[in-house]
Image (cartoon, helix red, strand yellow):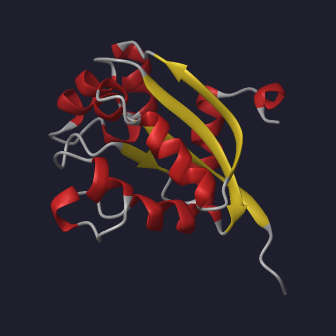
Amino acid sequence: MAEQSNLTFGIIKPDAVRAGKFGNIIQRIVDNDFKIRAMKLIHMTREEAEGFYDVHRERPFFGELTTFMSSAPCVVMALEKKGAVKAWRDLMGATDPAKADAGTLRKEFGGSLGENAVHGSDSEENAEIEIGYFFSKLELV
């Protein structure tokens, strides 16, 4: 049975937006055959970032993460492709840019473990939740 197209969620994080790299990242997304179903430039408040990353609230990096994610604009996206979650995670690369494979977004655009250029959903279930956090059904085209 052929794998159906599905959606995943991605963020081009404040470090990459601040560095003017979001256009290059969007081009790489398109070049890798993703369809952008929704996209917008936003500037999260600290409270919005805390709500989005609530699953990590008890982790030691929570404060630093939410401060960073609310420090400057970011680009949120709903991406479509067959096997979207895995395909996007493969394109992003390892969380730590120093350990990411050559040709991945984090290797090319990430600067550190904390400021690694992009975020992606880790499952189809979380992709649905994360897309719903930022987009209404009307915004998915």
Taking the image as shown, residue 112 lies to the left or right of residue 25, namely: left
Q: Looking at the image, which residue is at 36% across and 25% down?
A: 50
Q: x, y (%) of residue 98?
A: 16, 61
Quadrant (top left/top right/bottom left/bottom right) for the C terminus? top right
Taking the image as shown, residue 74 lies to the left or right of residue 30, namely: left
Q: How many marks?
A: 0
31 lies above or below 38: below
Q: To which quarter of the image does residue 135 belong? A: top right
Taking the image as shown, residue 70 lies to the left or right of residue 127, namely: left
18 lies above or below 37: above
Q: x, y (%) of residue 84?
A: 63, 62
Q: To which quarter of the image does residue 19 belong? A: top left
Instruction: From the viewer's side, name the closer residue of 65 and 105.
Output: 105
Q: x, y (%) of residue 137?
A: 80, 31
Instruction: From the viewer's side, name the closer residue of 93 and 8.
Output: 93
Q: Looking at the image, which residue is at 28% across and 31% down?
A: 15
Q: Looking at the image, which residue is at 25% across and 26% down?
A: 68
Instruction: From the viewer's side, name the closer residue of 125 and 121.
Output: 121
Instruction: From the viewer's side, name the closer residue of 19 and 4.
Output: 19
Quadrant (top left/top right/bottom left/bottom right) for the N terminus? bottom right
Q: Looking at the image, which residue is at 59% across and 62% down?
A: 32
Q: x, y (%) of residue 103?
A: 36, 66
121 lies above or below 51: below
